[in-house]
Amino acid sequence: MSSVKVKRATVKGLEIEGDLTFSTIDKNTARIMDKLLTPNDITVNLKQVVAADSAGLALIIEWLKIARSRNITLTFINVPEQLQALALLSGFESLFQSASQADKIAL
């Protein structure tokens, strides 16, 4: 198990490293997006995510809600298969359908 780290990669990009799991995500992780959503478009790279569970999917959904409330386009790239499978099982497969060929989700 590794902790989760959110790093600014570029002005409009974030990188997530570590595990997106119940044991690593807390309220501060969810609030990070409140502080970082300044441009109109943000790309979140999930390439360095090692493990993910339903808490990781819930975090992504929460971040998408925050982005939607601010008219910001939030795009996830390099979505791990674990998250894609969880979304499918949970009925959130539409998060991934809009850009499935590019392995990203957007709202």
Image: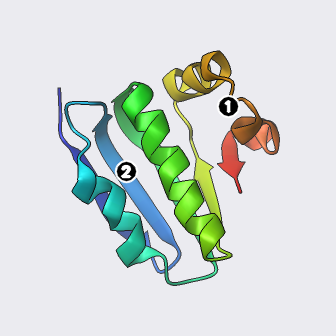
Quarter of the image where the C terminus is located: bottom right
* Badge nearest the viewer, 1 or 2: 1
Quarter of the image where the N terminus is located: top left
**Marks 1 and 2, Cα distance to the nearest angstrom?**
21 Å
In the image, residue 21 sits, relative to residue 107, either above or below, namely above
- Residue at 50 percent across and 46 percent down: it is 60
Position in image of residue 32 (x %, y %): 33, 65
Left or right for 36, reference 44? left
- In terms of image quadrants, where is residue 22? top left
In the image, residue 65 sits, relative to residue 2, either above or below, namely below
Left or right for 46, reference 2? right
- In terms of image quadrants, where is residue 4? top left
Camera-side residue: 50 or 34?
Answer: 34
Q: Are marks 1 and 2 in contact (CB under 8 Å)?
A: no
Q: SS class of the residue under badge 2? A: strand
- Residue at 58 percent across and 67 percent down: it is 67
Numbered label attached to residue 6:
none
Q: Amino acid at mark 1?
A: Phe
Residue at which label 1 appears: 92
**Classed neighbour count for the residue bearing mark 1: other residues with Cα under 10 Å, few (<14), some (14–19), many (≥20):** some
Residue at which label 2 appears: 16
Position in image of residue 100 (x %, y %): 77, 36
Q: SS class of the residue under badge 1? A: loop
Q: Earlier in the sequence, mark 1 or mark 2?
A: 2
Position in image of residue 8 (x %, y %): 36, 70
Camera-side residue: 44 or 107?
Answer: 107
Q: Amino acid at mark 2?
A: Ile
In the image, residue 82 sits, relative to residue 34, either above or below, namely above
Left or right for 11, reference 30? right
Position in image of residue 102 (x %, y %): 74, 43
